[in-house]
Image (cartoon, rainbow, N blue to C red):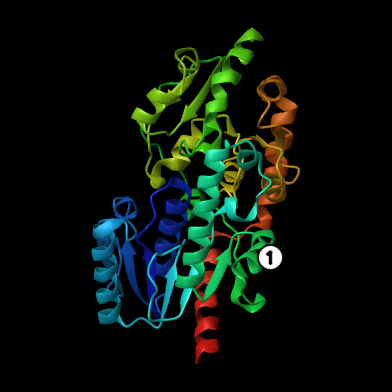
Amino acid sequence: MKLLINCSTLSTTGVTQVAISFIHECKFFTENDYHIFLSKTVSNQINESEFPSNFSFYLIDDHPLYGFRGFLIRKKIRKIEKQIKPEIVFSVFGPSWWTPYSPHLIGFAYPYIVYSKSPYLLNLSPINKLKINFQKLIHVYFLKRNGNYFVSETEDVSIRILKILKIKRENSYTVTNTCSSLFDEEISEQPNILPIKKENEFRFLSLCSLSPHKNLEILNKVIPLINDFNLDIDIKFILTVDHVIYENNFTELAKKNIYNIGRIEVKKCPQLYKECDALFLPTLLECFSANYPEAMKMKIPIITSNLPFAVGVCKDSALYFDPMDPVDISIKIKQLIESKSVQFELIDRGNKRLESFLTASERAREYLNICKQILEKEN
C-alpha cells in the first residue's frame, strides 16, 4: 500500500504525540510505502535518518489555510500528491484544508464540535461563543469537504460525529488513543529535567499547552487556597507552557508554586513523568487525552475533571473534582497528598484500566487496517 500520511497542520502537544508515535510504529509494517507530510513542529521531533528506504518525508513549512501563503502551500501539497500518486491519504488529524485526489481518512479530535454542553463553552462571553460557533461551522465544512472517512478516539465521539458530519456509519471508525511506545521502554538514567526534588516536595504534572479549554489558569485561584491549608509539604505544579504565554497568564503568587519548563520533546515525556508524583488535568474539553494512559503507565495517580470525557476514559482510576470550583479542586488535591492509600489505590486501578487500551503498535495496526478496508471499498 502506498500511503500518504498528512501531518502538515499539527502543532499542539497532544496531536503531535499521536502523529510521532504512529510514524515510528509504521517502521514495523514494512509492506507499505510511506510518504509523510510534516509540519515544522512534527519535523523538529523526527530524525529522518532513523527510517528505512520505504519512508519519504516532505516538510510543509507553513499552514495550508491562511491567506495567499496558504494558497501557495495548498498548491505545493497538491503538486507533491500528484507526483506521489498515493493509494490513500491519512490525515492524522484534520481538517487538512485541502482535498486529496485519493480516498481520504481524517482523524477527528475537535471536542468542542461534539460536546456543546462543556462548561468551557457554556461560560464563554457572547462574542467568544459567536467566534467558536463560527469556527465550528468552518471546521465542519472543511472536514466534510476534505474527507471521505473519519476515525475518532472514542466510540462516543464516533457516534456523535455521524449526525454532525452527516456521514454513513460504515465511514466512521474508532481507534483508542494510548501512550507512545516510548513509555514501554526501560527508562535509562537520564539527566533530570526538573530541579532536584526536595524531601518534602509533591509535584503535580500538567503536560499540555495553555489552550483556554485546558483550564490551567484556574491555578491562580487554586494555589492560594492550597497555601491556606498550611500543609507541611512543598506543592509544585509542573507546566509545559510557552514561556512568554506563561509569564502573561499567571500571578506572581501562583508562580511561587509552579515550575514551567516550556514545550518539551515527546521523547523526554517519560522522564518528566518519572520526576513527578501525580497528573493534574483540570481540562474542560477533550476527546481522549493521552495524558491519562501515560500517567497510568508511569504509575502515578490521576486527579482530573469530573466530566464525561474524563470519566469515560479513566473510570475508577482517577480522583475527580469540579474543574470550575477552585475550592473543590484544592480540597481534592489535599486529599490526594495526605492519603498514601488513595494514591496507591488509584495507581493500582490505573494499571488495570490500562489493559483496556491499545498499545502504540496495536493502534498503528488499526489505522493501517482501516486504510486497507477503505481501499477495498473504493476498489
Q: Work out whether 220 lies above or below 148.
A: above
- From the top left corner, tell me how far across and down residue 174 is, in percent: 62, 66
Q: Work out whether 286 lies above or below 280.
A: below
Q: Is residue 47 visible?
A: no
- From the top left corner, tell me how far across and down residue 115 is, in percent: 65, 51
Left or right, 305 with respect to 144, comes to right
Amino acid at dot 1: Ile
- From the top left corner, tell me how far across and down residue 305 is, in percent: 67, 37
- From the top left corner, tell me how far across and down residue 373 is, in percent: 55, 82
What crowding class fits label 1: few (fewer than 14 Cα within 10 Å), some (14-19), or many (20 or more)? some
- Total number of numbered labels? 1
Q: Secondary structure at mark 1?
A: helix
Residue at the image point whose x is 63% and y is 36% from the top: 123
Residue at the image point whose x is 61% and y is 34% from the top: 282
| Position of the N terminus by quadrant | bottom left
Q: Work out whether 111 lies above or below 104.
A: above
Q: Work out whether 232 lies above or below 5.
A: above
Q: Residue furthest bottom?
A: 379
Residue at the image point whose x is 28% and y is 57% from the top: 67
Quarter of the rendering containing residue 88: bottom left
Of residues 123 and 24, which is closer to you in this image? 123
Q: Is residue 183 visible?
A: yes
Of residues 280 and 10, which is closer to you in this image? 10
What residue would you read off at disc 1? 159
Residue at the image point whose x is 52% and y is 27% from the top: 217
Of residues 59 and 285, which is closer to you in this image? 285
Left or right, 79 with respect to 141, comes to left
